[in-house]
Amino acid sequence: MAEIPDKPALEGLEAKWDVAWKDAGTYRFDRAAAEASGRDGVYSIDTPPPTASGSLHIGHVFSFTHTDIKARYERMRGKSVFYPMGWDDNGLPTERRVQNYYGVRCDPSLPYEEGFTPPFEGTTKTIKPADQVPISRRNFIELCERLTVEDEKQFEAVFRQLGLSVDWEQTYRTISDDTIRTSQLAFLRNIERGEAYQALAPTLWDIDFRSAIAQAELEDRDQQASYHRLAFHKADGTGDVHIETTRPELLPACVALVAHPDDERYRPLFGTNVRTPLFDVEVPVLPHPLAQPDKGSGIAMICTFGDMTDIIWWRELNLPNRTILGKDGRVIADAPDVIVSAAGREAYAELAGKTVFSAKKAVVDLLQARGELVEVSKPFTHPVKFFEKGDRPLEIVSTRQWYIRNGARDEQLRERLIAFGREMSWHPDFMRVRYENWTEGLTGDWLVSRQRFFGVPIPVWYGLDDRGERDYSRVIVPDVADLPVDPTVDVPTGFTEDQRGVPGGFDAERDIFDTWATSSLTPQLVGGWERDESLWNLVSPFDLRPQGQDIIRTWLFSTMLRSVLEDDRAPWRDAAVSGFIVDPDRKKMSKSKGNVVTPADILSTHGSDAVRYWAASSRLGADAAFDPQNPTQVKIGRRLAIKILNAAKFVLSFPVPADAEITHALDASMLVTLDGVVAEATKALEGYDHARALEVTESFFWTFCDDYLELVKERAYDRTDVGQPSAALALRTALSTLLRLLAPVVSFATEEAWSWFEDGSIHTAAWPEPAGGTGDPAVLSAVGEALVGIRRAKTEAKASQKTPVARLVLGAPADRLAALRLAEGDLKAVGRIADLSYAETAATAVVEIEFGEA
RNA sequence: GGGCGAUUGGCGCAGCUGGUAGCGCGCUUCCUUCACACGGAAGAGGUCGUGGGUUCAAGUCCCGCAUCGCCCACCA
């Protein structure tokens, strides 16, 4: 046990207890205990792995604190808590950060350079792509690893300062060998069961990242556009048909016109052909119900591919593919074969090699020059699809990609996914709806391949035919025992390296997995799936998945999918979804808006307990305001933490006789009231309502300090008073209970105070149970009311609370008077009242007061 | 266009299975150093976005509307 300092303070507690907890292994997952107790004795958490590229933000502090509170509660309840930490270090954010940080970019065609030194180290300005030094894939990946390791150290430091009760021996990275092995193994199983497949199809494509993008990574952004009214010429020469488009540059990719089947204006045209302006290509006019008569001129051109609707029309109307955009977002050199006229080919030549933006201008100029641009509308804004991490609108190009079936085209699977979602508990419950909406609204299978570099390689090769072309029907998979593999380096069983890339040999898949394809396996990654079966059985399915509401469609959905495909069950029992942080203007905080506050400063300035308190006072799913200039709630938390230290010090100053018993009605009343608080806080925490648990506990704590402690301090101090042992014991009991109730939130101050009178960590102490005393709660509340009355009388007299009172008549309802008499001594002591008498009144109040010594 | 959530004193929030509103901050006044000035006490201040309905009784249940936020959408 530690000495009680003269002047307790919060400063330094974080560093002190972080080391102490680490040395004692306070939060270590006790595998032996878990094995002894079995799955039911374990509480396992599928912790979100923060993206290790850059810095943590206040939102991380917020949501991770929510999880930590529950973890600490379950630990005190006697569970072996499995609380790991992961870092999501693969993927685009890391690549982009590495490009900027070191001034490099990946060029897979380059050879590996031993001992490569990057041109920059930690630049603050953005380096233009043209100035980035091209390096090999292996060099690039090495830099990714180097940088993420550094970031992860900083992240751990912040989380330790915050006091997360993570078992820091249970960590994983989404780029480690173990992870790659697990990710590849799960994918091979998907292939085996026919859940993963490859297909050549129109794909949403980011021209800057040069990679395919999945539906879950889309976001709409408003863009300026104008309708361009173009004249198509009827093939029979009887006139023109006007269409409107925002994308005239796609005119050479036009494959048909489309109007609604019931549209009288265009009905006569169905089945006929028209010729495109400029390029003079004959295309059919077709009916399709998705065409909207009230939009534009009511008839649209279908291009391969301008938007998602084009894909649907193209597929359902069985149209040819005349893609003109390359993967770099520029118009490809070769015109579609159907453009045969000299004028058409000349026009196309003007566009070849141009970006979408320039090509649009060129087409408009050409159309204008030939008088075929009828009209250009005023610019307006409309939503355009972007990759959520991208800077330019997505294009749609035809590419070969890998997909995992997700229920979009399989009603049975979709229904199972929803059914498992209903088996789980969601906190708050309405978050389930978002999951269901997403699942029901899926438009296609999950595109998991990415044309990127830093990630888990897709573990396949393709057989090559005798001309050296990939035969996509001959997918070669590795032996499970050989995982992890990098197909670009490793050789499939039955082949030799010299068969790489030669006719009759093999060719490596160069794509990597989407980061979610690996993140969707976090339970498997951390739980020892196919690596440590006994661990897996102890922790899975996990108790808790904590996460942000913004990634329900990605992380939560995909984790559920993988679990259902692999094990036919939900991966967790509970999902706790935190809200996000909004600034004082109610805007979501995000890097792009530049209003992000870094947590390290906040933690240092106000103390971790204060910040934890702020986080704890928001319920799950509720957005929380945070004003870095004036973090009110944080300051309140700080006040609470300081009060805890001071109150503990005070309570511990009263000696508790060895044979002390609760004999006084007021003490018994306080303790039985506290029992109710324990019951309520416990119930709240069981239901993931940490805010409610904190509220009832905190509320009682202030009553305890302001009223009860004031009332009994004289008695507790006076060893000659027969009521002394009772008061001292009650105080000590309440302190112990309150500290434990507050420990999950105010983890540092409670641990500090605990160390003054108990051995061992409060965080492994038993969660309090109601003591089941026989007190009457009415006594404490009646005396509390009387105390307010006495104080008011003194305040109104502008007297100090310590002013002696010669005589005081206390009025109260009859049933309350009895309670007051039971605590008469304490009331007289706290009010410095010499002569206290009573009167029956409707409400509790001071009837007469006479100041002065007795 | 669809879905979800929010709307309670100046601000941030509680109000569980319906019975005429609570907490904290801020504010006003006062006290004070024997746990706590990173302190203590008392007080003023809302009829609960809006229009209906159910009920003896509605922030609290039902329907409509408005505003804000988030998510989704096949937006030529």
Image (cartoon, coloured by chain):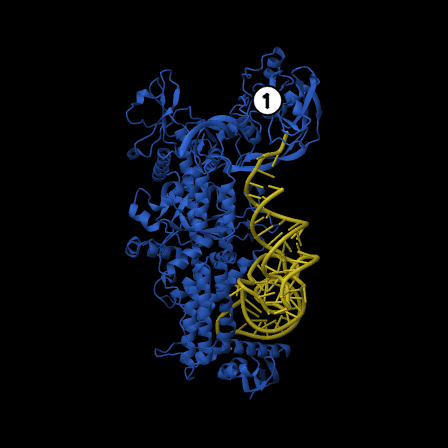
- Quarter of the image containing the C terminus of chain A? bottom right
A415 or A692, which lies in front? A415
Q: Is residue A708 visible?
A: yes
**Letter of the chain that mark 1 sits on in the rendering:** A
Q: For this view, does A820 lie left or right of residue A181?
A: right
Q: Please say whether residue A521 is visible from this viewpoint.
A: no
Q: Quadrant of the N terminus of chain A?
A: bottom left
- Left or right: A445, with A249 as reference point: left
User: Hey, which quadrant is residue B17 in on the image?
Assistant: bottom right
Which chain is painted in blue? A
Q: Residue at x 54, y 59 (%)?
A: A635
Q: Nearer the viewer, residue B74 or A696?
A: B74
* In the depicted structure, whether residue A547 falls above or below residue A607: above
- Chain that is yellow in the image: B
Residue A16 placement: quadrant: bottom left
Q: Quadrant of residue A369?
A: top right
Total numbered badges shown on the rendered structure: 1
Question: Is A274 or A768 nearer to us in this picture?
Answer: A274
In the image, residue B10 above or below residue A326: below
The three-letter amino acid code for the residue at tag 1 is: Cys
Image coordinates for residue B54, horizontal then vertical, percent: 63, 62
Q: Percent position (x, y) of residue A822?
A: 49, 83
Q: Which residue matches tag 1?
A: A254
